[in-house]
Image (tube, helix red, strand yellow):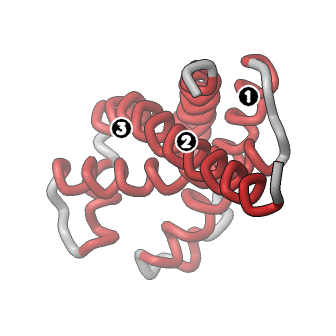
Amino acid sequence: MSTATAGSAQSQGAVSAVRNGIIAGVIGGVVFGMLMAMMNMLPMVAALVGSDNAIVGFVVHLVISAGIGGSFGLLAALLSLKGRTRLLVAGMIYGVIWWVLGALILMPLMLGMSAMVLQIGDTQWASLMGHAIFGLITGYVYAALGHRG
């Protein structure tokens, strides 16, 4: 196989990994979004774009979920993660990492609530559960999509 062909195959593999990650992230985001709706957390997500509408919050949440899912797919491909169990564990770890980065750091900073950075209460523990579930579902769906190519 020529170098150009190998590079093209790697590019296609990365694109496929990102695409599958985006799909997996959106599916994980829908489930997590339903949990967020039950806990009335979507208006806070909407505040990231200057709204308080839960539907706007859900859309913003899905866009974020797609980005996180795409980055999960790319990382999984770069690390050559294979197998449902490894991807489930990696997905859950990735969800927890995004709980720290997103819910505990970025979200409070973006909403002008710097005193809330790294503060953990009941809402944050519920958010951790949601992020872990998001990660598990994202890892599971990514693994399932990987079998299709």
Q: Nearer the viewer, residue 78 or 131?
A: 78
> What is the secondary structure assignment of the residue under circle 3?
helix
Q: Quadrant of the C terminus?
A: top right
Return the residue at label 3: 33
| Mark 2–mark 3 distance (CA, rounded to whole Å) | 17 Å
> What is the secondary structure assignment of the residue under circle 1?
helix
Tally of numbered discs? 3
Return the residue at label 2: 21
Q: Bin the neighbour count of mark 2 within 10 Å (Cα to Cα): few under 14, some 14-19, many 20 and up.
A: many
> What is the secondary structure assignment of the residue under circle 2?
helix
Query: In the picture shown, does residue 41 fall above or below 33?
Result: below
Amino acid type for the residue under numbered disc 3: Gly
Which quadrant of the structure image shows residue 142? top right
Depth check, mark 2 against mark 3: the one in front is 2
What mark, if any, has residue 87 been given in the picture? 1
110 sits to left or right of 40: right
Residue 54 point in image, percent of width and height: 19, 49
Residue 71 point in image, percent of width and height: 61, 54
Instruction: Determine the residue positioned at 65% across, 62% down.
Output: 101
Amino acid type for the residue under numbered disc 1: Leu
> Is tag 2's residue or tag 1's residue first in the polypeptide sequence?
2
Instruction: Determine the residue positioned at 77% across, 53% down.
Output: 6
Q: Are marks 2 and 1 in contact (CB under 8 Å)?
A: no
Whether residue 122 is visible here, answered yes or no, is no
24 sits to left or right of 48: right
Whether residue 33 is visible here, answered yes or no, is yes
What mark, if any, has residue 110 been given in the picture? none
Q: Nearer the viewer, residue 122 or 22?
A: 22
Query: In the picture shown, does residue 8 fall above or below 123?
Result: below
Which quadrant of the structure image shows residue 81? top right
Amino acid type for the residue under numbered disc 2: Gly
> Is tag 2's residue or tag 3's residue first in the polypeptide sequence?
2
